[in-house]
Image (cartoon, rainbow, N blue to C red):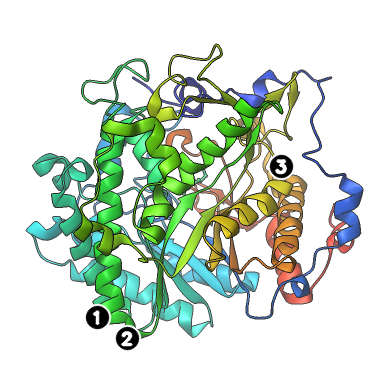
Amino acid sequence: MKLNIKSLATFLFLYLIDACALVPETSNIADGGFKLKEIEDLHIKRSDFPPGFLFGAASSSYQVEGAYLEDGKSLSNWDVFCHSVGCGENGENGDIADDHYHLFLTDIDRIHSLGVKAYRFSISWSRILPRGKFGEVNAAGIMFYNKIIDNLILKGIEPFVTIHHYDFPQELEDRYGSWLNSEMQEDFVHLAEICFKNFGDRVKYWTTINEPSLFTSYAYMWGVYPPSHCSEPFGNCLAGNSDVEPLFVMRNMLLAHGKAAKLYHQIYQPKQGGSIGIVVNCMRFVPLTDSELDIEAAKRAFVLQVGWVLDPLIYGDYPAEGLKYLGSEVPRFSMEEKNIIKNSIDFIGINHYTTIYAKDCTNSTCSPTAKRAIQGFVETTPYRDGVLIGECTGIEGFSVVPRGMEEIVNQIKTRYKNKPMFITENGYSSPDVHETRVNVMLNDVKRVKYHSEYLTFLAKSIREGADVRGYFVWSLMDNYEWLSGYGVRFGLYYVDHETQKRIPKLSARWYKNFLVNNTDLINMKAYA
Ligand code: BGC
């Protein structure tokens, strides 16, 4: 089966629809609860954030590195998956991606020229441990990341490292079924320890796993990410059980995180002095109507996406509101395991892009997938009465709703007693890039607006007391966008994948002005 972003729309766990394609030209778009004038009046500036606030840009290994079989790297799950089913719209894959493996030095110059103080990137597991715990450490892989870290530090940029961002050695899948097997916990801890030992003298910010909720549902419920496990009505895969497997995978991920974090807290943190967290995909859910049922549905969606990961890592167990729906299906934690995972994060990494409406499915007509316990009996839609919640972007259901940033931060702040937070991803992809001319892509006014507006609401939440300590733009440069291949671009830098030439977009110049010259939106108009 060929997967692309259009066909993915029918699979998405949130039952999303292709927002841009369905918007009639004359249709209304909700203002997301604010007026543009309000935003312009706020004139967001660097100085609206605390002086030590860490502004950065982000990427991940499979999406940028390329060099998929060089210098001892083994095949990862994504290499094998994309070679077999063909991932992007044109069967694209990450074999070369942005060739960052060879171009990292000039890329670091670009990061530096943005004026950011941090760079979030991830480690390719199969580059440093090609056979996981069944083989040796690959010295060339360690050297690669050492060079990145050293060069970042030379330029005064904090390395903010994600240990695992979806990609791992295929051997772990073939040997024992990767995340479905508890053996993966030990393999992950082994990887984490290699990272702490080799890089921890210089890396002060670690996140263990990127977006466990998204990964478990895409890989084991919808079956659209490797290893393509699912069952009806979610999809038609060769193997899997969509109602149960995501729960087992999540449990293994949480325990893997807990064990790695414990090791860090006990052995490495005392001498290295850094901190460790996890990154959670955090959509904002708002009730479709003001009925009690929809209000509850929106809360449930949040609890199953965010609370299912963070409650165990902060309070030691799954949230009661989620257990109520999933009940006997859920593999529980023993007392000993609860002690491992409880209080295992120093900070919360928030990936926030969009807001969506949530509708209750316990009583009303919904799609068959939304009526499943694993989905919390919730259906989501970006439309209310035919009106889109915010302007559409290059990804279905990712509407632009800036106030969602303030709301999600406040929601997490309240539930987790204002634990330190970093916005580890926030970004805009333009619709229809395939047909778009390069100079139009470079003049990315909408991306500039997106970041200014989301930052405005982030600053507001900080003023109201939220302990947010950093913000990373997704992404440093256009890259390999998973099932959408190279057709969806999030970068501050445009990348020509034929020549590997990088060109700063308007948004890169805006970010630099914002960071270095403290400029506001009004000055930006000079560029428009
Ligand atoms: C992922 C990134 C991805 C981005 C945009 C996040 O969920 O962490 O890898 O590129 O969303 O889709």
Residue identified by numbered label 1: 267
Which residue is painted at 26% across and 33% down in the image?
Answer: 245
State the residue at coordinates (27%, 28%): 229
Q: Which mark, residue 270?
A: 2
Up-down: is 512 above or below 28? below
**x then y, percent, for residue 404:** 68, 46
Mark 3 close to ligand 1, CB under 8 Å: no
Residue sitting at 67 percent across and 50 percent down? 407
Residue 204 point in image, percent of width and height = 42, 78
Residue sitting farthest toward the bottom: 271
Give the Cα separation between the discs numbered 1 and 3: 42 Å
Mark linked to residue 275: none
Q: Name the residue carrying label 3.
A: 401
In the displayed structure image, the side of residue 411 where residue 196 appears, left or right? left
SS state under label 2: helix
Q: Of circles 2 and 3, which is in front?
A: 2
The residue under label 1 is which amino acid type?
A: Ile
Judge from the rendering whether residue 85 lies leftward or rightward of residue 492; answer left or right.
left
**Residue 199, percent across and down?**
31, 77
Displayed quadrant of residue 373? top left
Q: Is residue 87 visible?
A: no
Residue 520 falls in image quadrant: bottom right
Name which of mark 1 and mark 3 comes first in the sequence: 1
Between 459 and 47, the one lying in front of the other is 459
In the image, residue 108 above or below residue 41: below
Q: Give the distance between the C-alpha atoms of the residues marked 1 and 2, in whole angstroms.
A: 6 Å
- Pointer 1 with pointer 2, Cβ within 8 A: yes
Q: Residue at x 46, y 25 (%)?
A: 8
Image coordinates for residue 361, horizontal then vertical, percent: 52, 20
Dot 2 or dot 3: first in sequence order is 2
105 relative position to 336: left or right: right
Q: Could you tell me which secondary element the residue under label 3 belongs to?
A: loop
